Image (cartoon, rainbow, N blue to C red):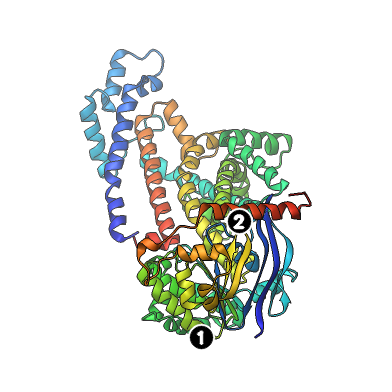
Amino acid sequence: MRWSAILKRLALIPPTLLGVGAIVFVLLRVVPGDPIAMMIPPGASPADITRLRALYGLDQPLLSQFITWLGQVAVGDFGRSISLRQQVFELVGARLPATLELAALSVSMALLMGVAVALVGSLLRGTRAEWLLDTANGVFLAIPDFLWALILLLGFGVLLPLLPISGRLDPQLAVAFRTHFYLIESLLTLRLDVAADLLRHMLLPSLALALPFAALVARLLKAQLAEAEDQDYAQIARTRGFSRTTILQREVFPNALIPTVALSGVQVTLLLGGTVLVERIFSYEGIGNMAIDAVINRDFPLIQGLILTFAVLFIALNLAVDLLVALLDPRLRHG
Amino acid sequence: MTAILEIDNLHVAIGAATVLRGVSLRVEAGEVRGLVGESGAGKSMVGRTIFGLLPAKARITAGRVSFEGRDLLAMPDKARRDLLGRRIALIPQDPMTSLNPVRRIGTQMAAVLQLHLKLSKSAAHDRAAELLAEVAIRDPVRVLNLYPHELSGGMRQRVLIAMAFACDPSLVIADEPTTALDVTVQRQVLQLVERMRQRHGAAILFVTHDLGVVAKICRSMTVLHAGRVLEDGLTADVLVKPHHAYTRALLAATPRADRPADALKPVPPALIESLWAEARRLDQLAAGRPA
């Protein structure tokens, strides 16, 4: 991709976010449910309710509410959470790193597993074992992440209690973190015991997110490997005396990787969406879990802040995937 | 003369279909032999057998292929891989799809030299630049750093020709190397192949459907139809006095500068049908059933 193409993509980000913001803002206020109703004690007088509504600006017309919010967001003020009574920016900032670490671990595990399965499947081509592998892969693909979460919870948390099933860190490990990237920080400061405990807490939720994604990567990559192996350049490499492993490594894999990254890269956004339920199931303190509470409490400012955060993540991810594909494919690099 | 390549009574079947029905041919050291036939005659199957690239369901049911006196079909995979690319090389048909799109020209060329000649990376790149200069590519050092899509079809074919001759092979199999190119480029490529052959002293098995090409560059020729050799001899003799009716028909169907265009005649369908009937009869005989 050329710089001009990248700049064009970057220029599209503000209007995209504006659109997302407008839709969320309007939808929240059109569907039934009112944050004030969720927070008032029973028996509050209508006058109290009116005062509270005025306090949060909910008595204003929709358009002027929206413009006020936009003006605040433009200067980095995402408002105060109604239910948690803290700044949205700080709340999200404290929780987002937990989700990013979880997602990064999931994607890494999924890539390792997916690539391994695809390579093994390619070597087994035409055998009965290949059929078995494909069938198993189909099962892994068909079971959604939240169901994996429940299966893993039951298997390794309850029946065979090997791993913790809730939270991010053992509360007995009193650690003062400077950032909210606990795993990265503990690795960088060589607190390996803390890192190990964090990983133990992350293993089941990240596995739940990783398994269907790994199956997707495996299926895509395996199909692409088969296709690349049939290409002339791969066949011709055989006429030059290269071994099958060398050909797989130099001719087939780099070419199969390009469509696999392009197709599975955008699916990482689905994995991020999956964190909402999976974090909930494992009481993992990320933004997904927070989003569910925010919705239950009709916490408008927090929901808006979280959705915008997800939107930024999705946009960044798509851009990153496109850049990565361009990096892998010289034909796109020269545009 | 000594034979570099000797194919003897080669039979190949894919599934239930027979594709080669006892092909025999010899390529002498340093000669250019044309292997001529229409689509489906089995020309590429001969090349694929030599390179071990037959499709998954194909079987060699009979015959011998010996290269420099060694049985290619019987030798272990590793020994054959040592010959391929070094002693036997391929000029592929389609330059647009025959280079890896994500690797630089220099890397792809150097890989062959590193594999077979055990050159260091930098020595291999230097040698690759020399080879590109040999095939008349200007500014070879710059071209080494390019990706295939940055070169025209003619340039890519030159790169592939340079790669084929890189390790001074004794046999080059050219699989319709001009079919995918413009007519103007075809001529240059033919001249280039001939120049490289003389320089590196290789024999060439030139697979083509174009009798014009054969007349220009081949010393001897083999005519293939339905997986059978119908005619074999020196090009000069075959073109002047073809023995087989099919060869005569092919010649009548080939445009020539010294004949008016309306003198062209298609190969008679009845002839084709009788040839196929013969081939089927051979198959039945081979299967031990009465014709």
Residue A193 vs residue A68, the one in the foreground: A68
> Residue A93: percent from the left, percent from the top?
41, 45
Which chain does the numbered disc 2 sit on? B
Q: Nearer the viewer, mark 2 or mark 1?
A: 2
Task: Name the secondary structure under disc 2.
Answer: helix
User: What residue lies at 45% left-to-right and 60% top-to-bottom?
Assistant: A328
> Residue A296: percent from the left, percent from the top?
44, 26
> Residue B260: percent from the left, percent from the top?
35, 66
The residue tagged 2 is: B275
Q: Earlier in the sequence, mark 2 or mark 1?
A: 1
The residue tagged 1 is: B198
Q: Is residue A244 above or below residue B127?
A: above
User: What residue lies at 73% left-to-right and 66% top-to-bottom?
Assistant: B63
Residue A192 vs residue B263, the one in the foreground: B263
Residue A89 vs residue A32, the one in the foreground: A32
Residue B217 vs residue A65, the one in the foreground: B217
Q: Is residue A139 above or below residue B207?
A: above
Q: Is residue A64 above or below residue A222?
A: above
Instruction: State whether residue A109 appears in this view.
Output: no
Q: Check disc 1 and give the amino acid type.
A: Gln
What crowding class fits label 2: few (fewer than 14 Cα within 10 Å), some (14-19), or many (20 or more)? some
Q: Check disc 2 and give the amino acid type.
A: Leu
